[in-house]
Image: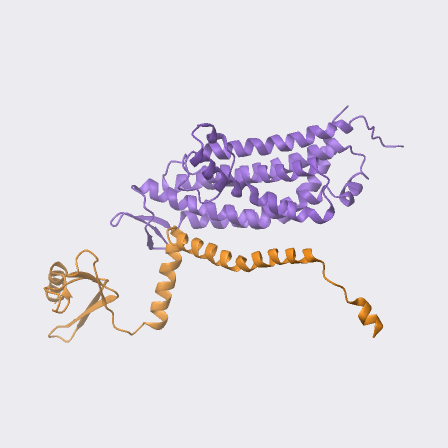
Chain colours: A purple, B orange
Amino acid sequence: MIMRLQVIAILAKHYFGKVSQHIGLLGLFLVGILLSTLPVGWDQHSSNVTFFGFPLELYGHSREESLSALLNEFFSWAWIIVALFYLSKLLKRLSESFSVNEMLWLRLIPCSPYEVAVARACWVIGSALALGTLGAIWVLTCSVFHQVGFDGLFVNVEGLVSHVLLSGGIVVALNLVIEIGESEQNSISVISLLTPMILTPIYLGINKLADTNYTLFFPYTIPFNRGLQNTIFHFGVTALIGTFLLCLHAVAKFRFSHVRVAIED
Amino acid sequence: MQLTEKRRRVQPWWMIFLLIPMLVSCAVPIVVWEVALYLGANLIYTGTGQFIEQVVDNLVDKLFHADSPGYVMPDPENLLQGTYSKKMKFTAINPAGQRKSFEINQPRMVKDSVSSTWRLAPDLRGLVDQILEGGS
């Protein structure tokens, strides 16, 4: 069994689409950087963060705390916009990529099921990493501009990455386990988009009842996570589970590897 | 006539169960309303909510209350002290006939007893006098 990297690259390129489809994302990134650097200031006299000159009471005890609270809020808004307008499209296309129609078209290229699966996993993980890179650049820019430590600012970037990974993983895993018709693809994508956030109240309930430390490894992701504790653990676990599901889906397709695909000349 | 008679059917008894989802769906607008209220109540505590609040306040002030007189907002812990709601403008004309004016945004106000009238805080009063008289 040979994995042909060339075929995988062609398929992944097909899945990623053109760069022009992601202009909106880059625009959001640039606007976000502009809004979170120049208009944000610190009023020494009243010890308030100012945004376009308007003082905001953010309940921070110091300049660093208040500023990182406001910046985390900006990252959360960006996360919500990305989830609504970018991630939902990605998940829809991901669940459509399992439909018989699309598979038939893809199989006109001499590719095997596991190559398609690996390309799909590469697509989702690559999207997550690309979003993470943009977020990291944003965080570092803010950190350098405002002279604030960046350890408290990476939470939302990690959360967005884990959200993409777990949602994609759920779509892929559901398609692996049960036969899903064309009509259910849309609802599957919506459910998987919301699942990481719905897990948050479930975690809070379990954490109140259970008297163990194992709840630290409960997966969930949610923007506006200011009051929550140990979010960095939970988001990391979420990302790991999502990656695991994506890899599992690719590995499971190896059971078709005895099928020989070759080009006839 | 016979045809229409034939088409009439007795509804099966379990059709009553279809009413349950309809009853549940009646509660959906209420839940949506409660969720909206909850989100709005929490939006106030975010920086974005405060920013929007202040922008809308300023807009309403500029559009509708541009020439209305201001009022004094008393402090909740001390009713004899307060803050004026708008800019207060001070003008003086010196003997040479030159006008001199400046503004203080939301100056502090005090009053001696509950029934007496508001006046400018003593330190601000001194500052105003100093600027208006000293510069002339």
Residue at image x 46%, y 30%? A216
How far across and how far down the image is residue A249, in percent? 68, 32
For the question of whether residue A129 can be seen, the reply is yes
Choose top left, top right, bottom left or bottom right for residue A231. Answer: top left
In this view, the residue farthest toward the top is A1
Q: Nearer the viewer, residue A134 or A199?
A: A199
Choose top left, top right, bottom left or bottom right for residue A161. Answer: top right
Above or below for B101 versus A265 = below
Q: Nearer the viewer, residue B35 or A243?
A: B35
How far across and how far down the image is residue B128, in percent? 14, 63
The quarter of the rendered structure image containing the C terminus of chain B is: bottom left
Above or below for A256 versus A139 = above
How far across and how far down the image is residue A189, in percent? 63, 45
Q: With A232 as the anchor, is A66 left or right in this view?
A: left
The quarter of the rendered structure image containing the N terminus of chain B is: bottom right
Residue at image x 65%, y 58%? B16
How far across and how far down the image is residue A114, in percent? 73, 31
For the question of whether residue A19 can be seen, the reply is no
